[in-house]
């Protein structure tokens, strides 16, 4: 200890204490082995109750008053003046905020609470033409601010584009016409079909909904502003607009746009090896040809493994046919192990 060294060297204890800012009495108290050093200031402050602290009963009263029907939708900044106009002092604005926050009653009070949207019903497609999804995307034109609109219908099971059209406007009438043509061309007749989409006005318009009802098609909708609920359509549009041959310049006419989309649809349906369906084309899966294709791939790999087993440390690549595709099946988070 520095004080002990100073005293041993000949300095007086009182003078050594002045140098380090402690009193002589403090040093004597710390040197006494029977006394446990305690910071008396913290001990006294910890046990002191603020004079203005509200009791639990008073806090309950404030919560009850602010939850009355006429105040339930108001924030504390509106409640405080309203009580003052009636000649009542409830509490300060900051106190009411603090109490409501501690009770989790502050955010979106009363009718200000936003509506809750439930997840779409999860369904499975086990064959083509059981579940379709659709959406509309913009195609730029040479006139700034004007767009062409691509209406595109996709089979969820096979990923095949079953119907499309490019129009100069976005409307529920065009959506209804395109869907009806696709429905007839695919020969759905009276078979069950679900059509999934987002919440755009063409999707939920009276004309489109009336067409679905007339044809006996079940409608399914995403939650507002949740793109994952219509992931198949969103993914398809990304594939389209990131194609190497997607025009660098905007389309000049609607006929030019339709010609490009027609070529893209043929490539996507018949040439594109889709990663989500074991790298067969959507057209092959839609026609049921993928079962034989995948079986042949599996045989090739099994033969290669028999010829050179040392090249495999485990099983061969999984070319198993995908029997069903799920729509709106959400992953369940695994519990975190601590």
Image (spheres, rainbow, N blue to C red):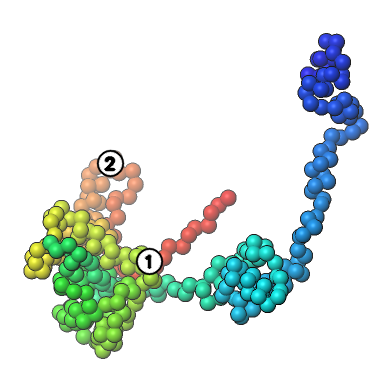
At which x and y percent is residue 232?
29, 65
* Disc with the residue nearer the chain's start (2 vs 1): 1
Residue reaching furthest bottom?
214
Kindly identify the residue that appears in the image at 81 percent across and 15 percent down: 5
**Image height of 278 relative to 73, above or below:** above
Q: Residues within 10 Å of mark 1 (few under 14, many from 20)?
A: few
**Image height of 133 relative to 271, above or below:** below
What residue is pinned by disc 1?
226
At which x and y percent is residue 327?
34, 69
Work out whether residue 275 can be spotted: yes
In-front residue for pair 43/316: 43
User: Which label is found at residue 311?
Assistant: 2
At which x and y percent is residue 11?
85, 13
Work out whether residue 131 can be spotted: no
Kindly identify the residue that appears in the image at 75 percent across and 69 percent down: 58
Residue reaching furthest top?
9
In-front residue for pair 126/54: 54
């Amino acid at each position: 200890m520095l004080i002990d060294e100073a005293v041993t060297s000949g300095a007086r204890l009182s003078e050594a204490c002045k140098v380090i800012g402690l009193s002589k009495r403090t040093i004597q108290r710390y040197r006494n082995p029977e006394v446990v050093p305690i910071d008396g200031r913290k001990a006294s402050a910890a046990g002191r109750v603020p004079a203005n602290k509200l009791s639990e009963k008073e806090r309950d009263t404030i919560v009850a008053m602010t939850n009355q029907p006429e105040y339930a939708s108001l924030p504390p900044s509106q409640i405080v003046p309203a009580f003052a106009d009636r000649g009542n002092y409830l509490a300060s604005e900051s106190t009411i905020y603090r109490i409501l926050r501690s009770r989790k009653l502050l955010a979106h009070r009363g009718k200000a609470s936003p509506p809750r949207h439930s997840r779409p019903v999860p369904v499975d497609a086990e064959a083509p033409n059981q579940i379709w999804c659709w959406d509309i995307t913009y195609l730029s034109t040479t006139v700034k601010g004007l767009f062409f609109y691509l209406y595109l219908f996709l089979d969820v099971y096979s990923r095949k584009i079953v119907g499309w059209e490019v129009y100069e406007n976005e409307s529920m009438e065009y959506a209804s016409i395109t869907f009806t043509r696709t429905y007839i061309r695919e020969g759905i007749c009276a078979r069950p079909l679900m059509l999934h989409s987002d919440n755009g006005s063409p999707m939920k318009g009276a004309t489109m909904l009336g067409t679905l009802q007339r044809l006996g098609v079940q409608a399914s909708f995403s939650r507002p502003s949740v793109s994952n609920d219509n992931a198949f359509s969103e993914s398809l549009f990304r594939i389209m607009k990131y194609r190497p041959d997607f025009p660098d310049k905007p389309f000049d006419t609607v006929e030019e746009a339709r010609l490009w989309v027609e070529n893209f649809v043929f490539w996507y349906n018949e040439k594109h090896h889709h990663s989500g369906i074991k790298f067969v084309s959507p057209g092959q899966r839609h026609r049921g040809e993928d079962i034989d294709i995948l079986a042949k791939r599996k045989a090739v790999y099994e033969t290669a493994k028999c010829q050179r087993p040392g090249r495999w440390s485990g099983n061969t690549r999984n070319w198993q046919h995908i029997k069903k595709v799920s729509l709106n099946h959400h992953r369940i988070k695994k519990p975190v192990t601590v």
